[in-house]
Amino acid sequence: MFWMWFWFVLAVIFIVVEVMTADLVCIWFGAAALLSGVVTAIVPTLPVAWQFVIFVALSSVLLFATRPLVKRLLRFEKSRDTNLDRLIGQVAVVTERIDNLAATGAVRLCGIVWTARSEDGSVIEMGEYVIFDKIEGNKALVKKKGE
């Protein structure tokens, strides 16, 4: 009876660790511990060594056979959503001449000065208005307003 409860408590511990980490590793050990506890409840005279063999076998099968499938289905992607996409399409003013060949250029939008490059490679003079087309890294790719 002790071993049955041992497996159930171990399953809970693994599941709690999985909830805290969400790496899809401990969940399989938790499931294997839960199934080992069920087997121990059904066959209470099962030797402890066999219980551990069952646990290791179930853990291995669950981890290596189902983890890649579940990860593909859940598509764990670390998104880097920011609010910068709201700047796309906004009009900015050039504060430093934009010249891609000279690697110079800056624009001001919403009170923030951005390093800027011309999307099409054209030179854009200071004081002109441009449209934020996209952001790559920390640089704004802009195009002349009206193009």
Image (cartoon, grey):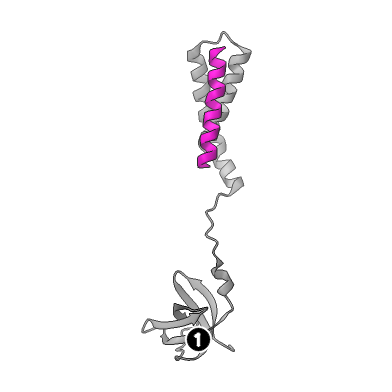
Left or right of 89, for residue 49: left
SS of the residue under disc 1 = strand
Residue 100 in view of the camera? no
Camera-nearest residue between 39 and 131: 131
- Label 1 is placed on what type of residue? Val
Q: Give the labeled residue for mark 1.
A: 93
Which range of residues does the magenta coloring cover? 1-24
Q: Main secondary structure of the magenta part?
A: helix
Could you say which quadrant of the image residue 96 lies in? bottom left
* Residue at image point 56% right, 8% down: 45
Residue 62 painted magenta: no
Query: Quadrant where the C terminus lies?
Result: bottom right
Left or right of 73, for residue 108: left
> Can you give x and y, in whole percent of width and height, for residue 126 in the image?
44, 90
> Can you give x and y, in whole percent of width and height, for residue 13 in the image?
52, 29
Residue 123 in view of the camera? yes
Residue 16 painted magenta: yes
Binning the other alpha carbons within 10 Å of mark 1 as few (below 14), some (14 to 19) or many (20 upward) gives: some
Residue, far front: 111
* Residue at image point 47% right, 14% down: 49
Residue, far top: 45
Left or right of 146, for residue 94: left
Query: Quadrant where the N terminus lies?
Result: top right
> Can you give x and y, in whole percent of width and height, for residue 36 in the image?
56, 21
| Residue 131 vertical position relative to residue 80 in the rendered view, above or below | below
* Residue at image point 50% right, 86% down: 93
Residue, far right: 42
